[in-house]
């Protein structure tokens, strides 16, 4: 049993860390200023420029199979990468990647959608959540009705990440109402690849954070039969696979952000003086720093365990829920403490803490709420699907 990173993993971690410190962190003040003025966080073309710099360093398609020109680093490496990138709030993602479920495309679909997405020529999004169906995926209402060689889609999706920018959406819709009802939502739904020019509309949803999801409207949108992704009536499993991957990644991002804000707090506590002494000498501050350090490392190991399990080809859904639940809540607590340590300055928009504070609150909601993670974890244990201490 090995509890330390390999030399290769350390090298990747350090390379990404240097990239974040050199290319991303210097942009933070510009991002804060742009957002205060209501402008996009990064000017047009800047993300692409950063992605190409990362490509020069060898980071392109970090989770993309080698046959598609990617690095295919594996899940453990991916976890380490996300932790490092999350140490800045500058919006960045590596180029050369595509949604995990898009690899289920047939050969024609790969040519039309997968390859252009990997190359950065097209942008995609995934749409399962609806106004009345978030964690309760059985309550999906959007329908797709067969009409000749086409399917006619009607309904709404909400809180769709990337929905305002996407060229196409992978949308889940009911294709067999009776089957959907009899299987309690596990069958009878299908995933469709739907180009924007087929007629769906998107609308920006304003939130308390800088994240701007979309509401999507499908009004008699006609989709050709060949745009079914995967199997007819089997779209629910694709949805679970998409969400399952996203869950433990939330935990990884929380670890990175929490580590950054806590280091900011340690540095500030050494400099800030009250009554002639640095606040680092105050026991109340020391307790917050100690508790945060313990929680960050606990979350780190949960995330790495979920990633390692997936690398072994094993089912990591239970661990993904644990990493998401604990990681998201840990991030909220640590960022709250960091803001408290910084006092009034932490509450201002001169520092990024209040921005992280608003962003962190979302971690406990999207890709499965705290409550649904607890349902999953307890159900697995009570029904004997997993046992305590099984994943060691």
Image (cartoon, rainbow, N blue to C red):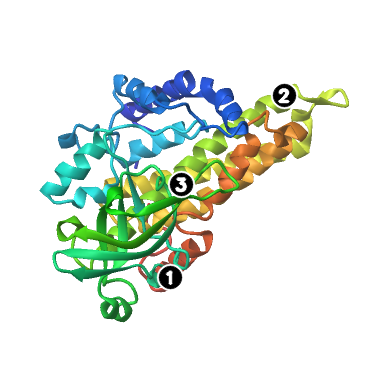
- Quadrant that contains the N terminus: top left
Indicate the quadrant where residue 77 lies.
top left
* Residue placed most toward the observer, 318 or 222: 222
* Percent coordinates x, y for residue 156 in the rendering: 40, 62
* Residue 184 falls left or right of residue 290: left
Give the spatial CA distance, label 2 vs label 1: 46 Å
User: What residue does disc 1 label?
Assistant: 379
Q: Residue at x 50, y 59 (%)?
A: 369
* Percent coordinates x, y for residue 323 in the rendering: 46, 51
* Residue placed most toward the observer, 145 or 390: 145
Q: Is residue 182 visible?
A: yes
* Residue placed most toward the observer, 73 or 50: 50
Q: Residue at x 58, y 33 (%)?
A: 35
First in residue order: circle 2 vs circle 1: 2
- Mark in front: 2 vs 3: 3
Give the spatial CA distance, label 2 vs label 3: 31 Å
Residue 250: assigned label: 3
* Percent coordinates x, y for residue 162 in the rendering: 40, 45
* Percent coordinates x, y for residue 295 in the rendering: 57, 44
* Residue 169 falls left or right of residue 66: right
First in residue order: circle 1 vs circle 3: 3
* Residue placed most toward the observer, 48 or 216: 216
Judged from this view, the residue extending furthest toward the right is 275
Q: Is residue 64 visible?
A: no
- Mark in front: 1 vs 3: 3
User: What residue does disc 2 label?
Assistant: 270
The kind of secondary structure element at disc 1 is: helix
The kind of secondary structure element at disc 2 is: helix
The kind of secondary structure element at disc 3 is: helix
């Amino acid at each position: 049993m090995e509890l330390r990173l390999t030399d290769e993993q350390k090298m990747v971690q350090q390379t990404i860390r240097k990239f974040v410190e050199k290319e991303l962190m210097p942009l933070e003040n510009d991002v804060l200023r742009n957002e205060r003025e209501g402008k996009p966080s990064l000017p047009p073309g800047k993300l692409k420029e950063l992605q190409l710099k990362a490509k020069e360093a060898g980071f392109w398609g970090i989770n993309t199979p080698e046959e598609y020109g990617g690095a295919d680093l594996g899940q453990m490496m991916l976890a380490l990468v996300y932790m490092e990138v999350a140490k800045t709030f500058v919006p960045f993602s590596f180029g050369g990647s595509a949604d995990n479920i898009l690899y289920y495309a047939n050969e024609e679909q790969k040519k039309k959608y997968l390859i252009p997405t990997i190359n950065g020529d097209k942008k995609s999004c995934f749409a399962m959540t609806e106004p009345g169906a978030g964690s309760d995926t059985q309550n999906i209402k959007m329908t797709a009705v067969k009409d000749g060689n086409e399917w006619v889609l009607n309904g709404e999706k909400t809180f769709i990440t990337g929905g305002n920018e996407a060229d196409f959406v992978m949308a889940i819709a009911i294709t067999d109402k009776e089957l959907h009802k009899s299987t309690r939502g596990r069958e009878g739904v299908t995933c469709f690849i739907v180009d924007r020019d087929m007629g769906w509309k998107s609308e920006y949803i304003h939130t308390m954070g800088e994240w701007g999801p979309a509401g999507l409207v499908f009004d008699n949108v006609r989709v050709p039969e060949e745009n079914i992704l995967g199997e007819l009536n089997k779209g629910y499993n694709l949805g679970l696979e998409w969400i399952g991957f996203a869950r433990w990644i939330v935990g990884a991002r929380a670890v990175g952000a929490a580590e950054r804000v806590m280091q900011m707090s340690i540095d500030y506590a050494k400099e800030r003086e009250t009554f002639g002494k640095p606040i680092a000498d105050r026991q109340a501050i020391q307790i917050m720093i100690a508790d945060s350090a313990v929680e960050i490392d606990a979350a780190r190991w949960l995330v790495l365990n979920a990633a390692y399990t997936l690398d072994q080809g094993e089912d990591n859904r239970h661990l993904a829920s644990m990493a998401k639940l604990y990681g998201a809540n840990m991030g909220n607590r640590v960022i709250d403490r960091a803001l408290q340590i910084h006092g009034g300055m932490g509450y201002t928009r001169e520092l990024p803490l209040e921005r992280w504070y608003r962003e962190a609150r979302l971690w406990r909601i999207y890709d499965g709420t705290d409550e649904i993670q607890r349902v999953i974890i307890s159900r697995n244990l009570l029904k004997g699907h997993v046992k305590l201490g099984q994943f060691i």
